[in-house]
Amino acid sequence: MITWNAWLPMLVPAVSLLAGAWIFCLREDQRGLRGVVNITSALLKIMLVILMLWGVYQHQFYEFRLHLFGRVDLVLHADPVSLLFVSLSAILWLVTTIYAIAYLEGSPNRTRFFGFFSLCVSATTGIALAGNLLTFLLFYELLTLSTYPLVVHRGTEKALRAGRVYLAYTVGGGAVLLLAISWLYSLAGPVQFLERGSLAPLAASHPGELRVIFGLLVAGLGVKAALAPLHGWLPVAMVAPAPVSALLHAVAVVKAGAFGLVRVVYDLYGIELCRDLQVLVPLSLVAAFTIVYGSARALFQDDLKRRLAYSTVSQVSYIALGIATLGPLATTGGIVHLVHQGLMKITLFLCAGNFAESLHIHRISEMNGVGRRMPWSTAAFSLAAFGMIGVPPMAGFVSKWYIGLGALEAGSPWVILVLLASSALNAAYFLPIVYRAWFLPPPKAAATAGWSAGDSIHPALLWPVLATCFLALLAGLLAGSSYSPLFWARLITAREYGL
Amino acid sequence: MSWIVFTVLSPLFGAVASVVTGGRLRDAVIALTAGGTALSCVMTAAAVHAAGAPLRLSVGGWGAPLGIRLHADGLAVVLMGATVVIGAFVTAYARSYFGFRAESGREALFWPIWFIMWGALNALYLSGDIFNLYVTLELINLSAVALVALPRTEAVLRAAIRYLFVAFLGSLSYLFGVALLYAETGALDIAMLARAVEPGLSASASFALMLAGLMIKCALFPMHFWLPPAHANAPSPVSALLSSVVVTASAYIALRLGFTVFSPLLASPLAPVIGTLGAAAVIWGSLSALLQPRMKMVVAYSTIAQVGYIFLLFPLAAASPAAATLAWYGAIYFAVCHACAKAAAFLAAGAVLDVAGHDEVRRFPGLARRFPVAFFAFGLAGVNLVGLPPSGGFLAKWLLLQSAIGQGAWVVAAVLIAGSLLAAGYIIRVLERAIVEEGIVTRPADRRHRGLTWPALGLAMAPIVLGFAAHLPMALLEIGSPVGAFP
């Protein structure tokens, strides 16, 4: 039983790593086998995650440790925080894989695409389960490497330019992170991620250095988390195929950055140390600025995917804001938004992919009347957009509510103003889309078709959208139940604050 | 004990046998030689590991100072092991590469010359005195020039002649240093010299002369001008060998002598000078690599940059014993991983050149679809050259960075990181051209070239394996290490 517990955290990334290696060895025309490998590994991963969820809930400890060299170990362990992120990526990976198989049907280079797609998920789960900073960095860089081929998948000059920008940001961010981690190791030795932090012993002797390292860590992670002004890659990377934008740029990559911030604040520095060093106030200011700035920029985008991208910039910073606001309620709100934003944003991106795929609609100005032509996708889009605005009972409301309450609890009421301003901006850029889609007449060519009974797209493109939308709805409706992300976030908060 | 001798003898037997045989028989000789050399190197490493201490062997029973003494410590067997890995894959690659061409003639000379070089490399790593180091290094350089000159085109011959002159210049400088040291101390054996050398003008002069010779030979900035044409115009298996094992051999001597015979001089002003040259090499080499129009030139300039990292060890080691230990293990591991990755990158570039008929980056669009394995191998080697996890290059850079940050050498840390970013630039520049699909009619790859692309991929996996299995080479390196156990 001991060995089983030790291997379980390693198996989760290994499943998709092996699936990726297998897919690389397949020929381009072996689409059936490729699909089977993809789906089987996704299902296998979900089963492993469910096993660990059950164990961690019962205070089971899962840790895999591989001695690399000297004092440096590769550590993967499962704690409540990592499981929140792992569950999210495991579920969304399954959904997106089904979607991607249908979306890329008939296009070239699918072996390469799905091979790297699997590597990405391996990297994401590795980030989630990393037990120390070096392991985190390993998977963080692996994520950069494996997402690049997906961003440039189309092989057009535009895609390559985007890839260059993407790499310039992420490799640069990785270098800053490497510097910070290396500095920290030479100060403190191999530091683990522990609940309530592990750097407290250094607080008295090296406060200045710890502050600078915190700044470097936030800068390195902030690139992927798209904190302004390090967000420039995200809108550009939207040239990638829809499933990539959806899973990677709305969920895996930006979440990897945000998740890293969670780790740094709670499990590395710890709340008390962060408070003593007074490093959270600058972080919350940056996050607040990014929230408003991202929303404001989103307002002026006509390209649907670019508008969604700026919306991501804004929404991911809710997580940073929740983390940077001291107090259990804000923590809960920030951490639960990790899941809520993922569910809603993936729905929006997959819907955008559906509009582009079946109606060739890329711009918001072309979206008049899509509700009549693709009622299901548009309905899912609208619900997710309401969630982003923060309309109850969608999941987005729950996160905003907790962050707002937490801000009051922490005595920083200005956060409420940020939330209000951002919600108003969210409404200003999402509601016109919803209005156009449902209430404006479609262009003449399409008008003759009238209301269609259902979406005329492949079911494998429609069902994933409905599934994620449904999950986002459930996460909000059943927030109080003991199976909800909120419940799990409160469990994390209780352990981090020692409540 | 006798395994040690066979690490030198079996490639030499192979060199003779490959001249007098042909056809399938020669294939068997090649396989047998590579296998036999690999086996004897592995057994030597196993013996050193089992003994836990350096092995010494006096050939023919003559001890120092008269006879040839072989000296196998952890550093020697690790580098011999790296040569085995690289040598095995390059041999497999060269079998396909030259197999496409005439069975006999000039190109058939590759085999005896390469096996002589392999034997000389092993002898160099095993030799315990500075004159034998000179002899073996000379042998390596002569065979390297001969290998470059295999194809009889004008550009190649010009590069080969230039290489020959530069190598001689380096040898001469090194030999002067040896003579000076011998005149002063009357000893050639490294262990004896380490006890005899005292800091002073003559010791500094001989160190400077020997180091200058070695720096020319491993193309440290600003003596790097000869390397790119020689390495990039040579036949691809030769390019791979030159940029990996040959360059590493010269750097090895510099490290070996710097930390034994001349260790009292590490704190002298020489160390920062060498470090500055190393840093300049990292920046200059990487920037030049960014501008090269040909893939093999990119890889060749990358060698200049990566050699610079190894020499950053000298200023880092001067500060404190703890910093020296970290930097020493980092630099050695860096040299090993770089050798594997660089050879793999050249093999991949060579496969592209051979199959596509050119290696101009500008004309790459569509090639990634035709030769996915070659470009995947190049990317994988690139991961190590950039120093990204999970490669051994990352571990090595991590150790160097730890040493630099621990002593507050922020300039060195900045150079390490800037070099990585620039490397990412020149690797991606090549890869992204190959990914372009616009306006390109692609033909599917023909299967004839698997013999070139798969060895490249296999060798490109080596640095990744070194990233995960670092404790074995590190444990070996601790045996007889001049800086103590790995921290």
Image (cartoon, rainbow, N blue to C red):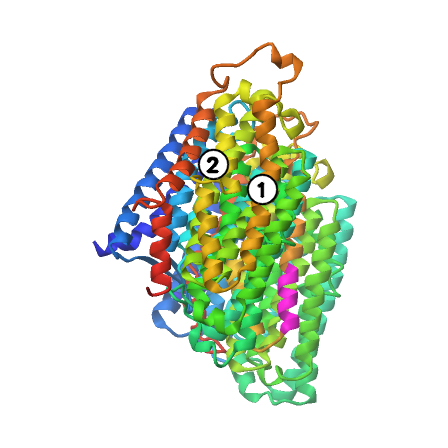
**Which residue is at 32% across, 58% downward?**
A63
- Given the current orientation, which residue lies at the most extreme left position? A1
Q: What stretch is highlighted in magenta?
A: B410-419
Sequence-first tag of 2 and 1: 2
Q: Is the magenta stretch mostly helix, strand or loop?
A: helix
- Chain letter of disc 1? A
Q: Is residue B202 left or right of residue B408?
A: right
- Asked if residue B225 is positioned above or below residue B212 in the image, the reply reads above
x and y, in percent, of residue B428 in the image:
64, 46
- Residue at the spot of label 2: A24
SS type, badge 2: helix
**Residue A354 in which image quadrant:** top right
Name the amino acid, label 1. Asn
- Residue at the spot of label 1: A426
x and y, in percent, of residue A407 in the image:
49, 59
State the quadrant of the C terminus of chain A: bottom left
- Asked if residue B306 is positioned above or below residue A16 in the image, the reply reads below
* Residue A148 magenta-highlighted: no
SS type, badge 1: helix
In depth, the one of B29 and B210 nearer the eye is B210
- Asked if residue B116 is positioned above or below residue A29 in the image, the reply reads below
Marks 2, 1 in one chain: yes
- Asked if residue B419 is positioned above or below residue A344 in the image, the reply reads below
In depth, the one of A245 and B33 nearer the eye is A245
The reply to whether the C-beta atoms of the residues labelled 2 and 1 are less than 8 Å apart is no
Measured in 3D between alpha carbons, the distance from the residue under mark 2 to the one under mark 1, in whole angstroms, is 41 Å
Please say whether residue B8 is visible from this viewpoint: no
x and y, in percent, of residue B147 in the image:
65, 51
Name the amino acid, label 2. Phe
**Disc 2 crowd, CA 10 A, few/some/many (<14, 14-19, 20+):** many
